[in-house]
Image (cartoon, helix red, strand yellow):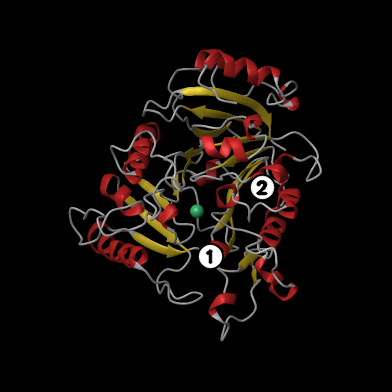
Amino acid sequence: MQTNWYGLALSAALILSVAPADAQTAPTPPLGKAPAALELGKPLSPWQTGMLDIHHINTGRGEASFLILPDGTNMLVDASGKTVETPPFSLPTRPDASRPPGEWVARYIARLLPATKARGIDYALISHFHGDHMGAIVADSPRARAGGYRLSGITEIAEHLPILTVIDRAWPDYNYPEPVKGRTVANYRRFLAWQAQNRGLRAERFVPGRNDQLTLRHAPKDYPQFEIRNLYANGTVWSGTGSGSRALFPSLQGMSPKDMPNENKLSIAFRVTYGRFDYFTGGDLSALEDETLSPEQGWKHVETPVALASGPVDAMKANHHGSWDANSAPFLRLLRPRVIVIPSRAEGHPSVNTFKRMTSQATWPGPRDIFITNVSPATFTTTYGVEKAASTQGHVVIRVAPGGASYRVFVLDDTDEAQRVKAVFGPYASQ
Ligand SMILES: [Zn+2]
């Protein structure tokens, strides 16, 4: 459904299956007294203390999410940014090509920060070392004002907003499962070193199993029902008990390069819990990289053990932009999300088979709404049924009510920076 007609979008949301069955019975959440119709066409109302906001920001050129936690602590997950690909493989930059994607992300975040009183980004996570998540460095990438590194994605964002802590999967040696090479990561490491020395930036390695690495920084005692559980990175998954973890990969010593796990399968995954509400995000995790994978390579199907560690969730970010090799049926069956957000960034996102798995009642029974940040005209013709998604263009914001009992989903206009509401869905009752 294209949702440029605000009124049409709202009535469609109420009439079609996108109006969740449980919305009829769910109590009106304390999310502001204005009925949805009054919110349409206006900028999204500011975050308030106690809310959990999860923004999936569409730049057309990669993936970036921004979370505002109940006490105002904030977290950037991936930084969008230039990829080494050019259109038609990448989508056009949103709102337009006048600024690089990292700068658009920084400006988007800057509009949200006053409500939280933060002056910068508390946590910036890089799920894995690919250009569409951290910002690819190419020959003509501009230089930073200081520091001798170049700007794209995370380094571009830091040019506009201070970042307190960066967390990735391989700090400080960048040696797993083998030395992480390339211009983009070399530039990123120069950035971390300079920022640590000159701006007090702290870098950390993400530790699977922990629930005390990503914490509320201001008032944790006010929100005992809030937790971020580190589920997975680098082939290591939370064991489900305490902060324990276990390895999924066999020994990689001496393994031939063609058999090594690819970068996507090393992505950071975590679960956000707020009362009854749960949200899953896992970078570009994937299940299948080759349908002819031999049984001995079954350890590469990392999605299923990660979903087992997570358990069911209310909402999730789709893995790997909804690509054909990710969001397997066993993975979806274990998570059973009511809301799926697909941060698409190229033609074929989401792919026809993945979208079919997500929408099929045979995968798991029950209602679900799918929000896609950006569907290209070509993908409309090849991913059958994609027009039935709850939305196919715009930033997608999940706003969880204080305490976590219910949540709504807002689709925001991505053609300018006003963050205007195009459509509202829910309230959904957290399960
Ligand atoms: Zn990606």
Judge whether residue 52 can be spotted in this image. Answer: no
The correct choice, above or below, for 113 with respect to 320 in the image is above
Look at label 1 and name its amino acid: Val
Quarter-of-image position of residue 419: top left
Can you say which quadrant of the picture contains the C terminus?
Answer: top right
Q: Residue 393: horizontal and vertical position, in percent? A: 51, 32
Judge whether residue 149 can be spotted in this image. Answer: yes
- Nearer to us in this view, 423 or 62: 62
Task: Say which residue appears at 57% left-offset and 70% top-offset.
Answer: 261
Q: Is residue 45 left or right of residue 235?
A: left
Residue under circle 2? 354
Task: Say which residue appears at 18% left-offset and 53% top-offset.
Answer: 145
Q: Does label 1 point to a residue whose CB lies under 8 Å from ligand 1?
A: no
Q: Earlier in the sequence, mark 1 or mark 2?
A: 1
Look at label 2 and name its amino acid: Thr
The correct choice, above or below, for 282 with respect to 193 in the image is above
**Callout 1 secondary element:** loop
Task: Say which residue appears at 32% left-offset and 38% top-offset.
Answer: 97
Q: Residue 214: horizontal and vertical position, in percent? A: 50, 54
Can you say which quadrant of the picture contains the N terminus?
Answer: top right
**Callout 2 secondary element:** helix
Quarter-of-image position of residue 12: top right
Q: Residue 412: horizontal and vertical position, in percent? A: 48, 28
**Label 1 neighbourhood size at 10 Å, few (<14), some (14-19), many (20+)?**
many
Task: Identify the mark at residue 207; answer none if there is no mark.
Answer: 1
**Label 2 neighbourhood size at 10 Å, few (<14), some (14-19), many (20+)?**
many
Task: Say which residue appears at 29% left-offset and 40% top-offset.
Answer: 99
Q: CA distance from mark 1 to mark 2?
A: 30 Å
The correct choice, above or below, for 363 with respect to 338 in the image is below
Quarter-of-image position of residue 60: top left
